[in-house]
Amino acid sequence: MTDDVSSGTSGKKTGSERRGADLARDALAAAREQSAARRKAAARNADANPKGRRSGSAASLQRRRWSGSGPDSRDPAPLGATLKRWIGDAGAGADLTKATVLGRWKEIAGPKIADHCEPISLIDGELVLRAESTAWATQLRGLAPQIVAKINKEVGHGSVLRIRALGPSGPSWRFGPRHVSGRGPRDTYG
């Protein structure tokens, strides 16, 4: 076996002889050189600015190293608040609000109101209620601000913005919020 030193080669592998460990060493050396260059540049900037102040918009964002006695963004947050923020960021808040209002309607609105109406939909902050009679629909329209406040207190502020109360209705051939005006199916019943 011949030694690399005795044969005159320097011990560095070239070209296709390089393996993973050699490549990792080269990457580490390059990263160290870049870091040293950044430190030198930072030292030059510190020398150019003798008072130690940073220039630009980052100067106003100096980090405070202590928390203090008041609440801070770095303080631990309650799990409920963290989940609400996460759900809001994920965009699932509207579906959860809808499920909560429709699922807990009897306990949110109270048994007296819930016995005479049912929630139909909650879209864009508008809660649609179907009343059992036109008298109850009128009553719900008058109680709408109190019901909205009660729902927002239970579910969360801004969950419901307005209430639309509908009375009982006969059979309808309309499906959805849009329709074409006209006579419709007149010959259905003979």
Image: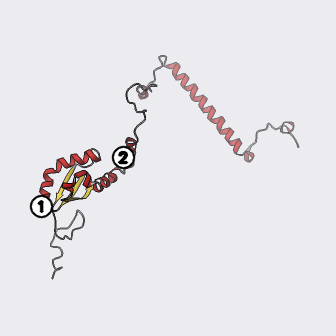
The quarter holding residue 153 reads top left
Q: For the image shown, how many numbered marks are present on the structure?
A: 2
What kind of residue is marked 1? Thr
Gap between marks 1 and 2 measured at Cα: 37 Å
- Residue furthest right in the image: 1
Identify which residue is drawn at 25% across, 51% down: 108
Please say if the residues under marks 1 and 2 sit with CB atoms less than 8 Å apart: no
Comparing labels 1 and 2, the label whose residue is closer to the camera: 1
| Quarter occupied by the N terminus | top right
Identify which residue is drawn at 30% across, 56% down: 103
| Quarter occupied by the C terminus | bottom left
Identify which residue is drawn at 74% across, 43% down: 14
- Residue furthest bottom in the image: 190
| Mark carried by residue 88 | 2
Residue 127: x percent and y percent? Answer: 23, 54
Q: Nearer the viewer, residue 84 or 151?
A: 151
The quarter holding residue 106 reads bottom left
Secondary structure, mark 1, is helix
| Mark carried by residue 134 | 1
Identify which residue is drawn at 61% across, 28% down: 36
Q: Is residue 168 left or right of residue 49?
A: left
Q: Is residue 24 above or below residue 105?
A: above
Residue 105: x percent and y percent? Answer: 26, 55
Residue 117: x percent and y percent? Answer: 19, 59
Residue 96: x percent and y percent? Answer: 34, 52
What kind of residue is marked 2? Gly
Q: Nearer the viewer, residue 175 or 164?
A: 164
| Mark carried by residue 52 | none
Q: How is the image coloured?
A: secondary structure
